Amino acid sequence: MHLEHFNQYRHLTDFDLTYIKEKRIFFDPPDTEVGSWVGHDLLKWQKGPSNIIDLGSGSGATAASFVRQGAAMSIGVDISQDSLAWSRTQYEGSEYKNKIKFISYDFLQSSPKDLESCLTKKEFPKIITSNPPYVPMELEDEQQFISVYGGGDGLRYFYPTLDHALYFKADMGITLGSYSSLKTVFSLLESSGYKVISMTLCVLPFSQPTLDHFSRIQTLIERGEALIWKGESNDAGYIIVGIASVYTGSKNKGQTESLFRILEKACHSRTSALEELSGKSVAGFEDGVLRVLELPRPGKRRHW
Ligand SMILES: C[S@@+](CC[C@H](N)C(=O)[O-])C[C@H]1O[C@@H](n2cnc3c(N)ncnc32)[C@H](O)[C@@H]1O
């Protein structure tokens, strides 16, 4: 197992790190940077420049980072018209010309066939990524917190991401929280023929919507499905988990237990350096990359 540490942004630019004032555009740079690392690992895995589709592309910063990392074509899709307008203005032009585009698409309500009909054959993806809304909450109005609400198990958007990836037989990247039901995620990836090649981890404090609706996470913790991080001096939060997986078409037995064990160790660490992971190789993930990010957090977080 190869363990890496980074304490600076490698993928987001100074421009991406400038606080976005528009109300309905997601801004939480460490989260976005984790998703960019996931795409980085999957692009590196390909034999040549490949197309990548980012489901729930938000500000477009991740999709833009994929172009800088050598994607042949990077397509972001989002349901938010404000986000689409912003990302088109910022990134469809200049250095990204003809290599990036943003499409209005609801990946929760649509089938992969609908996405296919929005693409030319030349645009079919080799990689599908998503850093979707992933906070487990109980809400009466599901239109509230549309950028973070991940359903009762935090996986409301994971399932359609997997459906889309399987439809295109694409490699798949997903970014979730340690309090989402990750055992289910690892197990579904395993049974669907996906081998995890890397995990990128970054501790983050709970956001206000999460704290205001914590009872669901509490239930998942009691059931052994959710993990949170409790550091020294009353620090508490969760770990953003970026998972890069490649389609092998066959079961990767034992993967689920190994990966969950890694997250348990990470969550038992006293500091955000996740020191419990150092010097320990985990059986079943010997050839995988484990990356820990400790990043500055510029500006206020914007969730909506
Ligand atoms: C957590 S934000 C992440 C944004 C971006 N991926 C990033 O990492 O910065 C989730 C994004 O998913 C979008 N979204 C929510 N529901 C969606 C849906 N049904 N279809 C497409 N996008 C959706 C939101 O508008 C938001 O931009």
Image (spheres, rainbow, N blue to C red):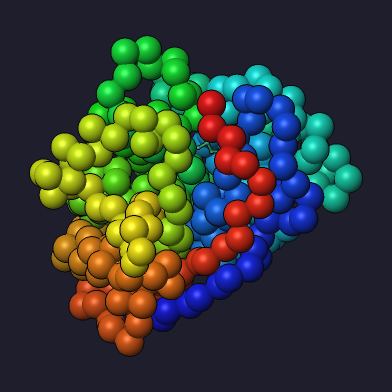
- Quadrant for residue 282, please give it: bottom left
- Count of numbered marks: 0
Pinpoint residue 175: horizontal percent, then vertical percent. 43, 49
Name the residue located 58 percent from the left edge and 28 percent from the top edge.
78
Q: Quadrant of the N terminus?
A: bottom left
| Camera-nearest residue between 277 and 94 | 277
Q: Where is 253 relative to 163, above or below?
A: below
Pinpoint residue 209: horizontal percent, then vertical percent. 42, 31
Name the residue located 52 percent from the left edge and 50 percent from the top edge.
31
Is 178 on the left or on the right of 26, as rendered? left
Pinpoint residue 67: horizontal percent, then vertical percent. 71, 53
Q: Where is 169 relative to 140, above or below?
A: below
Pinpoint residue 155: horizontal percent, then vertical percent. 31, 36
Which residue is farthest bottom?
279
- Quadrant for residue 200, please give it: bottom left
Let me know if residue 38 appears in the view.
yes
| Camera-nearest residue between 189 and 301 | 301
Let me know if residue 159 appears in the view.
no
